[in-house]
Image (cartoon, rainbow, N blue to C red):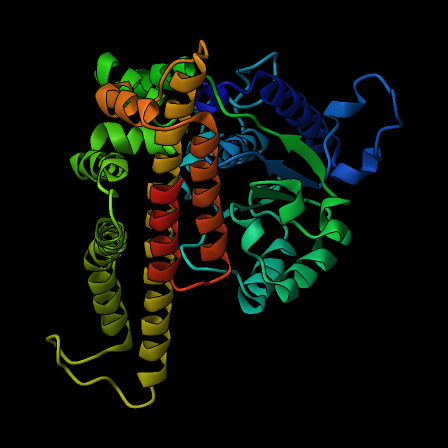
Amino acid sequence: MAVWDDVVGQERVTQELAAAARDADALVSAGQAPDAAGEPEPGEPGGASRMTHAWLFTGPPGSGRSTAARAFAAALQCISPDRALGGAPGCGFCDGCHTTLVGTHADVEIVRTDLLSIGVKETRDLVRRASLSPAGGRWQVIVLEDADRLTEGAGNVLLKAVEEPAPRTVWLLCAPSIEDVLPTIRSRCRHLSLRMPPVDAVADVLVRRDSIDPAAAATAARATQGHIGRARRLATDERARARRAAVLKLPLRIDDIGGCLKAAQELIDAAGEDAKQVAEEVDTKETEELRAALGAAAGTGGRLPRGTAGVMKELQDRQKRRATRTQRDSLDLALVDLTGFYRDVLTLQLGAPVPLANDEVRDSLDRVARASTPVRTLRRIEAIIACREALDRNVAPLLAVEAMTAALRAG
């Protein structure tokens, strides 16, 4: 299996990355840095595939931008004489490819965050890491999966490293859109734009890679409109299917103000339950591991060594920020599913020849479509979008969702 196999529905991107990996391999053999070749002149044959030191992967959530970045990182570290795509590195089997894909390669740092932002301190640590020479003699690769969460100060710290990179350092930045990255940073990166993969391609990869039943894979891929990560979760997690089913019932439960307020509270409670489940799975383990590393007395209430309370407080603060992020992400996912419901309603009202994402609730879709008009459906979709924007501005979640459910009722 080549490293590109999991980059679903992005043929143009994989061809460009494979060509760049081929050029990178030639530069390593010649003992050069990526900038030694220079930026290509407009129209120069093969110039678009030339290796460079900084890349920006953009695309909507679920398009696989992080997967593409990790695949490229693996291809850069490939040490096998066997070639994958068009004679390019990235066999998927050698030690360089395998350790990169599983996250244990000494020269590949994969950075993802479950917090609201990436600060200056974390970015400075990354920059220091990027200045090191690769232990394996090929490339020092930094994959920043959430470049859109860099604070302004952190972005300025990163800018210096991208402007003056170490000879064998490659930055791979990922963000939903090019506007989510500072103009000064994106101007120094080669930009690759990914699209949402076709539903059939997502279903195929779920069957091939995750051994999911073809019917369940097709349903999950259609329901998530090609979002790979969400499709996998929906196909494998019964709780995720139950939460989604509850969200799709909401449009039928907002006939009066009381129903609107109750539905809003239930959405908030479900998001809070998600955050609680993550805390139960992760926080206790993290806390016990840190206590053991600090030499705390045995048992949950064992005393910590003198001078270590600040370290524990830092961990607790991080866990609180992660819970906030988890709750917000879970709520946003519910709003995305709700948008999909009204998108299907609009499809039925307009008679558009487009497959329904939520065909399993066709009766509910028909009922809402008959009781409304396309204009009112569009207003409802706009109300959901306004709610998501309000949450991004840190409006109190319950207030934002109550305003949305009232707008959905009014149409």
Residue 1 in view: no
Q: From what the image shows, is residue 98 above or below residue 299?
A: above
The N terminus sits in image quarter: top left
Residue 137 in view: yes
Q: Is residue 353 left or right of residue 224?
A: right
x and y percent of residue 281 in the render? 20, 55
x and y percent of residue 203 in the render? 34, 17
Figure disc tally? 0
Q: From what the image shows, is residue 224 above or below residue 135?
A: above
At 75% from the left and 27% from the top, the residue drawn is 50
User: Between 67 and 378, which is closer to the camera in this rendering?
Assistant: 378
At 66% from the left and 39% from the top, the residue drawn is 55
Q: Residue furthest bottom?
A: 306
User: Between 387 and 81, which is closer to the camera in this rendering?
Assistant: 387
Q: Residue furthest top?
A: 353
Q: Is residue 54 left or right of residue 336?
A: right
x and y percent of residue 278 in the render? 25, 54
User: Between 111 and 199, which is closer to the camera in this rendering?
Assistant: 199
Residue 226 falls in image quadrant: top left
Q: Is residue 340 left or right of residue 276?
A: right
The C terminus sits in image quarter: top left
x and y percent of residue 400 in the render? 40, 57
Q: From what the image shows, is residue 112 above or below residue 98?
A: below
Q: Residue furthest left?
A: 299
Residue 272 falls in image quadrant: bottom left
At 48% from the left and 24% from the top, the residue drawn is 7
